[in-house]
Amino acid sequence: MTHKKQMGFSLMETMVSIAVLLAVGGIVMSGMAQLMRTQGTIANRTDMHTSVRSATELLQQEIGQAGKVSLAPPLANVSLAAAVNLGSNGFTLQASDGSTPAVYLGEALTVDVGAKQEVVIVGGSASSPTALFQVGHAAGAPVSALGAFATGIVPPGAPAPNSPGSSGTVLKLYGDINSDGNMLYVEYTCTPGTTANPGSLYRNQMSITAGAKPAVDNTMILLNNVLTNPNDPNGNAVPCFTYQVQPLGAGTCVTDVAVTLTVQTANKDPQTGQFQTETKALLNVSPRNVVEVYATASLTDPLRAQVIPPTVSALLGP
């Protein structure tokens, strides 16, 4: 009589297999958990880098463009709407694209070409401008505003009576920032905080003819989680904005802006349990229009340095 051999696993073999499976599973799960923590670290830092890069790129673009003067959108020609005679006269401008060119008190306009070309200074009012003409000009004579605003980056101190300029926490600039013919006034306000209570970077934009400045609110936040900058090697505090100021005529102009921003991640690092931080420094951001007019006005033609519009002076205050 023969017996069939029993096929299967013994209890001992089953227990060993389960132990091996649990060990391998534990290793795999530990690796996956570590991978998830690493991914969380990378995602935190990526979000922080992206936010800082977006903010600093906008700052670079607008600082570089500050001070640009425009009477009308690009490619539009501006001319006298009606003839003007020798002497003090009112005048109106027209643009070939149908827009209405805006002028302001103290603006230097270059009128006409050839032997009749002259530079006149706008008087009267923005709505009813006048100028002292040395020669008469026919209707259709071309008009342009050459140069740039010398205070396109508003210098620190008091560039206008009773009106504070830029500071270590507030950057004030104006001009045709977007090269679209619209003259804008922009304020960047930096309110650095602590790890437990971080601050923000705000951007407040308006037309240079706005009657009042909108109050800063959370809809204007450009960058969150802003911290106080680390001190420099000498132990001195590092502000968000610093300025290289040059004398120009009776006033000053800013030819270089340094931007330093320290931020932390929105969430704590899954691996360390701490917020990650980064300090971004832009040490040489030059407002090219201001730099160009600084050189021109200093060497050849002081009228190329356009004065600050009265409406901008009114917006500089709190």
Image (spheres, rainbow, N blue to C red):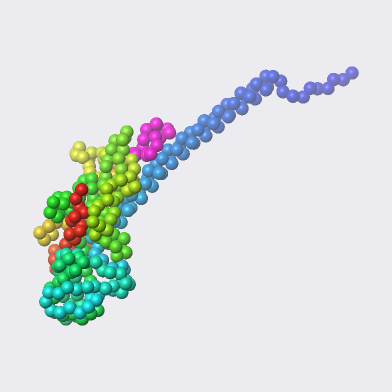
Q: What stretch is highlighted in magenta?
A: 264-280
Residue 65 seen from this side: no
Q: From the top left corner, tell me how far across and down residue 124 is, in percent.
A: 15, 67
Identify the residue at image location x=87%, y=20%: 2
- Magenta stretch: dominant secondary structure: loop
Q: Is residue 234 above or below residue 61?
A: above
Task: Depth check: give the residue in front, 274 or 96.
Answer: 96
Task: Depth check: give the residue in front, 312 or 179.
Answer: 312
Q: From the top left corner, tell me how far across and down residue 281 is, in percent.
A: 28, 47
The answer to if 267 sits in the magenta stretch is: yes
Residue 178 seen from this side: yes
Task: Depth check: give the residue in front, 303 or 127.
Answer: 127
Identify the residue at image location x=80%, y=22%: 5
Answer with left or right where residue 113 lies relative to residue 61. left
Q: Is residue 155 above or below residue 234?
A: below
Name the outermost residue toward the right: 1
Q: From the top left corner, tell me how far across and down residue 71 is, in percent.
A: 25, 68
Number of marks drawn: 0
Q: In this view, does 164 lie above or below 72?
A: above
Identify the residue at image location x=52%, y=30%: 30
Answer with left or right where residue 148 lies relative to residue 36. left
Answer with left or right where residue 297 lies relative to residue 284. left
Identify the residue at image location x=22%, y=42%: 238
Q: From the top left corner, tell me how far across and down residue 20 is, in percent.
A: 61, 26
For the N terminus, give its image quadrant: top right
The answer to if 28 sits in the magenta stretch is: no
Q: Which of the 4 quarters of the picture holds residue 18?
A: top right
